[in-house]
Amino acid sequence: MTSRKSILTWKWRLQKEGRRWYDWIMPITAAVIWILVFVNLNSLKADEQINYTVPAIGMAAAITVFASVKIKMHNIIEWILKVILFVMIPAVCMYLVEFCNDNQIFELEQGIIFMNYGCYMAVLVLFFGLTGRLKGAYIGTLLFSAIYGLANKFILLFRGTPIVPWDIYSLRTAASVAGNYQYSIDKTMLVTILGFLTVIFAVAQLKPKKISKKRYCVSFVTSITACALTYASLVPTEKLELWGVNRNLWKQENAIQQNGVWLNFVDNTKDITLKKPEGYNRKEQEEIFSEYETKELTKKQKKNRPTIIAIMNESFCDMTEWTEEDAVKVNQEPLPFTTNWKKNVIRGNMLVPVFGAGTATTEFEFLTSQSQAFYPTGSVAYQQFVHKETQSLASVLKSYGYKTLAMHPYYGKGWNRENVYPLFGFDDFLSMEDLEHQELMRYYCSDASNYENIIDQYENRGDDPLFIFNVTMQNHGGYVGDKTNFSHTIKEENLGEGIVDEYLSLAYESDKALKDLAKYFSKQEDPVVICFFGDHWPKLQTTIYDRMFPGVDEFDRTVRQHTVPFYVWANYDIEEKEVELTSTNYISGFVLEAANLPLDPWHQFLKDMQKKLPAISTVAYVDKDGEIHSMDAESEKNETILELRRAQYYYFQDRK
């Protein structure tokens, strides 16, 4: 040991004198880090341009040193170090978060780099206000940035889009299915963890400092006020856009590449609430909708009201139709029934608003006939915007004397359904806890078992006509190939991926179960309409999809991966129709027409709109000539799209 006046002194962390219980945490963490490094040595060397082995081992060694000893510094040295850390920690956080998410920070524009730095500095100031200490602020900022950066990377891998502010509403739903996915860290994530831990362990060497309550209150109020005023003066006022932030609500994954991860999140916070569309005038909308009248049922319609069953099938799509020729080769047709299901069927393809996840968003479009294109990207209307009675297919049918029932063979709290469905006009909601038939396929209720519950409700429907909206679970990710209790009927020969076999085999089982359901209802004397559609494509690894779409440009691939089939079938004669491409918000109109029921004013408006805008979704729209266009910033100026946007805002947000 050296004298107290020395610049540096040190002692072993685990020696008995002055040892606390938490001193064991750092050495244990260091040991875990070494295990992670050695387990991932091959992946660290995998990059041909950069070998991460040396920096990884170097940071692991630094972590071990900081974990093994307690270092004390001269007061002046420590004060200088704190000043340096105050400037450097926001920069370190910015660099590591961007690195973790495969962004090259130095390729961003200088103004964007400066604004990202400012956002991390705001986090540092906020933590200083919460803790009252610089050491607490440094560690809090580093931990927050590490957790946020890693979480954003996981979300990108699973969902294809980054974290957005409204994801907080989806935490409970995400937690309910999180255990069914496989998790692993790649080399950038490992290096990110090492980088953050190195700095955190270094900061942990600073002396703890006690402060008075008065000083804490002053720092708390000052810091919180400064952050609040800065946010209010910059973010809602669109100043960030004036300084170079690129607003890309349509593709958030592209936005973080241009704006940086944390700055893009901060900028998105202003989209938590809905805004009036450009050129919106309430009186004009009232005049438009005055042309559409609410129609009463005729005696014939009232007498012949069919049972209506709408089934949104989890992750159902015709994958082999949209992938490149010969890229996917299967041993047999995955969807033999629906491919040839044409008698008394309105069928076609529709654009859905999400890919790989986000079931509730497609569900929202179908039930309300609204377009998610006019809501903030990644938002979930069920959790953010549905807080009052809202017109839906359920409420329209209820006005026609229907008993309305929602069914889902999983947890009822998911996506806030238990609160939303009553606001939509559903009389009842039966979830996993209420349904008798629960035979599992992998981890979830099978479609076949789920349809037995539908049949039970039909056979006990009573005198009133019945509307059932059913959301399935069988095909939900994650797909783990041959490690499940599920045999694969469909074998894919080119890709050699067990998870592709698993998904295609699940789709085959969905097709088979639907065939049996249609067969049952085809024998019923009472009229029945079944609407069946998928909510989105399955979330498989990007590398697998890359091999399915060789040479396909990004926009074409995006459109294909947002296209699923839909079918509206009746057990009586209806006019058969092939629809080349539509979107989810129009489908319930087909259902009402197949059921020979009158269209309410909103569906009357949509029927007229569909002639000018056959399809609209979050990624693309189709014009009256059948041309497909990207749903980008330029599309906001399209007068037809603006017409629909203004009408939707009026009808669902501003109508008395």
Image (cartoon, rainbow, N blue to C red):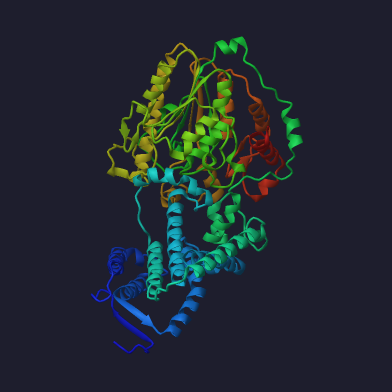
Residue at the limit of the structure toward the left, as seen here: 16
Q: Which quadrant of the figure has residue 442?
A: top left
For the C terminus, give its image quadrant. top right
Q: Which residue is painted at 49% across and 35% down in the image?
A: 419
Q: Position of residue 629 (x, y in %)?
A: 63, 44
> Relative to 637, is 143 on the left or the right?
left
Q: Nearer the viewer, residue 451 or 342?
A: 451
Residue situated in front as seen by the camera: 275 or 480: 275
Q: Is residue 103 left or right of residue 492?
A: right
Image point (42%, 35%), residue name: 412
Percent of width and height locating residue 492: 36, 41
Residue 319 visible from this viewpoint: no
Q: Please state the horizontal and vertical placement of residue 341, each as a whole percent of the image.
A: 47, 24
Please determine whether, in this image, residue 212 is positioned above or below residue 639: below
Q: How many marks?
A: 0
Q: Is 168 rendered above or below residue 586?
A: below
In this view, the residue in front, 340 or 509, is 509
Q: Can you say whether 164 is above or below 141 in the image?
A: above
x%, y% of residue 559?
54, 43
Q: Is residue 86 above or below residue 365?
A: below
Quadrant that contains the N terminus: bottom left
Q: Residue at x 67, y 22 (%)?
A: 294
